[in-house]
Image (cartoon, rainbow, N blue to C red):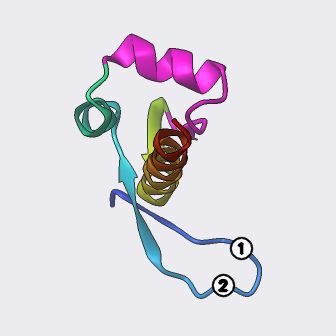
Amino acid sequence: MSNLATDTEPGAEMHPQPLLKIGELEYILRIDRRTVFRLCQTGQLPKPIRIGGSRRWRKQDIDRLINESAEATKHEDCLR
């Protein structure tokens, strides 16, 4: 099975989207598994997609979260 999802928004072209496993998410964010699930429960991370018994996160959602957090931090630093 492929490690890809497709964009299902109405009118969107079908492009494969990479899905991240928990270990990859831990590595990218430099946090442990328990923190990943805690952040998902509090809404600070997107909820995972369930595929059978596996959980996967869309890479584009994580990239967007990182970029938004970086922008917010940049603006906070300017206000100090």
Q: Is residue 47 above or below residue 67?
A: above
Is residue 34 toward the left or the right of residue 61 in the image?
A: left
Residue highlighted by disc 2: 12
Label 2 vs label 1: CA separation? 5 Å
Q: Residue at x 50, y 56 (%)?
A: 64
Q: Residue furthest top?
A: 34
Q: What stretch is highlighted in magenta?
A: 32-52
Residue highlighted by disc 1: 9
Residue 13 locus on image (x, y percent): 59, 88
Q: How crowded is mark 1: few (under 14 residues within 10 Å), some or many (20 or more)?
A: few
Q: Are marks 2 and 1 in contact (CB under 8 Å)?
A: yes
Q: Is residue 58 above or below residue 51?
A: below
Q: Residue 35 carries which label?
A: none
Res 39 quadrant in image: top right
Residue 72 locus on image (x, y percent): 55, 46
Is residue 43 toward the left or the right of residue 16 in the image?
A: right
In the image, is residue 29 part of the stretch drawn in magenta?
Answer: no
Q: Looking at the image, how many numbered discs can be counted on the residues?
A: 2
Residue 15 locus on image (x, y percent): 48, 80
Q: Which residue lies furthest to the front in this view?
A: 80
Amino acid marked by disc 1:
Glu
Q: Residue at x 26, y 39 (%)?
A: 24
Q: Residue at x 48, y 29 (%)?
A: 53
